[in-house]
Image (spheres, grey):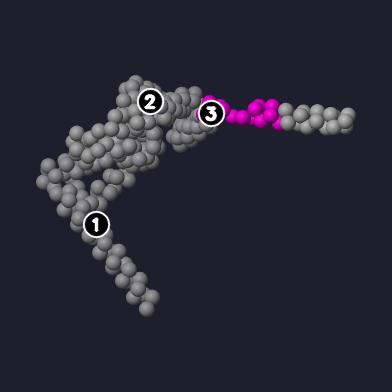
Amino acid sequence: MKKFIVSSMVLAAVVFGNAVYSQSTTVTPEAKAAEAKLKSDEGLDKKADEWVKSLSLNDAAKEARVQAVIATHLKTIRDWHNEHPPATVPAGINPVTGNKLSDLDRQIIANSAMPKSVHENLMNGLRKDLTEEQVEAILDKYTIGKVAFTMKAYKEIVPNMTEKEEATILGYLKQAREQAVDYKNMNQISAIFEIYKTKSEQFLNNNGRSWRQMYKEYTDALKAKKAADKAAAEKANQ
């Protein structure tokens, strides 16, 4: 009987100990969220640091200020985005196209409602310590070089592009880039660029060009080259 009582006490102690351990190791949703945000903060701090180092400023104090400006902006963009999901924007239609608003449309609307001071703080903070060329280099980091990439494509599509055409389109793309830095991911950034690409193509149409025709001729030429290259490769392998 005594042996049974002792065994029961040991078993109870083990069960109780396991219960206490389980409770002490249970991670609450709040703790998980805090841990995820801390990890995200570290990643954004690292990204900002890498972007600043790419400028080779050779001034520790200036680097620290610029890094803080960028990191603060990145975290603010993330927080606003996460706190304002598409569902916070009522479902409806695009008043221009009549199409039903997609989740991407609604997310962009939600993000565009962010206070203007967030963007102003970024641009003013960058311009306080950087040249305009260096500011543009940072904006290119945000948008993975979409200005240069898109401009290159326009030059390939538009034959004999004039100085006015180039300056106008480049101006639109730079507007897209600066606006796009206030959005969290590449889907949203690309959507902002689409707005200004449409403006560029409308400009060309309104000034004696036919965007549709130029684009068709460009794609036809690509297809012809691909077919020719394939035929040449097949002939070489015979």
Other residues around mark 3 within 10 Å, as few (<14) / some (14–19) / many (≥20) = few
Q: Residue at x 23, y 51 (%)?
A: 157
Q: Nearer the viewer, mark 2 or mark 1?
A: 1
Query: Can residue 21 be found in the magenta stretch?
Result: yes
Residue furthest toward the bottom? 238
* Residue 62, x across and y down, in percent: 46, 25
Q: Nearer the viewer, mark 3 or mark 2?
A: 3
* Separation (CA) of disc 3 from disc 1: 51 Å
Quadrant in the picture for residue 216: bottom left
Dot 3 and dot 1 residues touching (CB under 8 Å): no
Check disc 2 and report its element: helix, strand or loop.
helix
Q: Which residue is mark 1?
A: 219
Dot 1 amino acid type: Thr
Q: Which residues are magenta?
A: 17-35
Which residue is at a point 18% across and 36% down the rendered structure image? Answer: 96
Q: Which residue is mark 3?
A: 29
Judging depth in this view, the residue of 94 and 117 nearest the camera is 94
Q: Residue at x 33, y 22 (%)?
A: 115
